[in-house]
Image (spheres, rainbow, N blue to C red):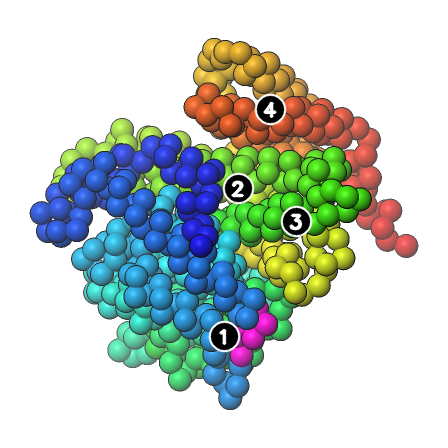
Amino acid sequence: MPNFFLDNTDLQFHFDNLDISEIVGIMEDDYEQAKLFNYAPVNYEDAVEGYRKVLEMIGDMAGNSIAPRASDVDLEGASYKDGKVSYAAGTVKNLKQLAQADLMGMIFPRRYGGINMPFPIYMMAVEMVSRADASLMNIFGLQDIADTIKKFGNEEQRLEFLPKFCSGEVTGAMALTEPDAGSDLQAVKLSAYQNNEGKWFLRGVKRFITNGNGEVLLVLARSEAGSKDGRGLSLFACYGDETVKVRRIENKLGIHGSPTCELQFNDTPAQLVGQRKFGLIKYVFDLMYRARMGVSAQAMGISQAAYEEALKYAKEREQFGKAIYNIPAVTNILLNMRTMLESNRALFYSAVNSVAIKEQTEEKIEKLKAEGKPVAELNTALKQMTKRANLLTPMCKYILTESANKISYDAIQIHGGTGYMKEFKVERLARDARITNIYEGTSQLQIVACLGGVINDILSEEFDEKAMKEYKGGLVRLHNVLKEIRMIFKDCLKYILDKKDPVYQDVAAKELVDLYSYLHTGYLLLEQAEKESRKVFIANRYIIEALASARKNAELIKSELFSDILHSDKILIH
């Protein structure tokens, strides 16, 4: 029977090469928690052994329980009747099984009923769940709702909400989007007001809310009457009680097991999370790190599932007297899929670790502050960590979700006509993949979010250090190729900056961000190839193709083609 952890050698490679000892030490209070909880690890090695057991358990559950139900969940979907939302039968079984295994509180401290898993381990779990059923990730992966309450709420709120998430008693939703405020969250209008006793209430409409039927809602609302921008927004937690009306659920292309709701808040009692006016500029921004990583993990899982289905079908399907796996045109597609899959996973866990280190450093600083200890040095380090996470998070979301669409598209192509039929999984995977590069910020917005870090070349010191490193054998050639790509990037960056034209920077953003991603991912793969010979093939194929793409990007940046975009108003308007 399949185990989605044990059958994935690349995922195991990343687990075996995790370097999270510092993160775990902070989470475990230098392993002092072992004195309070008999199941807490006593050292790092003990912690890693426990993480592996958890991932093997999730891998077994994903492969043997969740995945077999996925087709029926997709067919049945979530339903809406008389104002109530119901999950598909398979989704109900999945959530019950996950709760019984204490997995609905993976990332929360033990004192609230969680199992205190580090963020990278949680993301591995989300990837496997997504491979089994992408729609389930949209419920399982919303543990981050409670994580925001843990970070920014008060202790009373933590004690109220977190144990309910950990036990599976409640699921959550983040209610951000509105009919007139999609990606532009500064335009949120839903109002929050106080009565004479100082209690908060919510009034207004939210749209496209993933798992909006959840029992606990985290709501971005306008708390400052008369304000127009993000400084007038605060964050609130409330229950999805009788004052919250689900007006409808959307009839979607994919992820049918996950209900997407339109909500009307009718003077709903709410609790302010954190400080007023910080809802968007601090709390939602922080939440988006994890939300974008969650969707990246979802895309990663869909990509893995699509590749596995394509590979299996190619080996079984015979044409012209041989398996189509042995037809070079098909083989090349499969090799491209595998290269994309493994290079994306390298980028993904690099970004995940950046977010995890940033978050744990923030917690360490708060702890030291409470103890009256100096934090100046850590604050300086945190600034660089934040810049890195601010770059890699949107870069990862952009590249992985675009790739999921490409990989699932190619999986259908390998299946031929049968892949277009609902009897085969790849049809569902392609539909599920399509939303990933739209929600939690479209690919275009992710590129914009990356641009500042790329323009400022914030990884320059890392790249310079890597350029000075010495490699052996065939890796020397690949190292030189990355040096050439670095020169191409610097030349393109100078060309853009010399123009002193912010509009031109925006027009050339995609090509410039792509160039930067080739460098970061290429160096990650080069380091992996040093550790494991199997990775040499992936590094070679990725880096050589990246050079060709880099040259193309440079030609585009310096060509007259972009002038058409700059003057599009004259071209497109008739």
What amino acid is at disc 2?
Cys
In front: label 1 or label 3: 3
* Left or right: 235 as drawn, with respect to 84: left
- Mark 3 vs 4, N-terminal side: 3
- Mark 1 vs 2, N-terminal side: 1
Q: Which residue is mark 3?
A: 316
Report x, y in % for residue 200. 34, 73
Q: Which residue sits at x=54%, y=24%?
A: 536
Q: Which residues are magenta?
A: 74-79
Residue 155 found in image quarter: bottom left
Marks 1/3: CA–CA distance: 32 Å
Report how many numbered discs are placed on residues in the image: 4
Report x, y in % for residue 202. 41, 75
Q: Which residue is mark 1?
A: 88
Q: Which residue is mark 2?
A: 396
Most extreme residue toward the left is: 35
Circle 3 SS class: helix
Marks 1/4: CA–CA distance: 44 Å
Mark 2 neighbour class, 10 Å CA radius: few under 14, some 14 to 19, many 20 or more: many
Residue 540, labelled with which disc? Answer: 4
Circle 2 SS class: helix
In front: label 3 or label 4: 3
Marks 2/3: CA–CA distance: 34 Å
Say if mark 4 contacts mark 2, CB within 8 Å: no
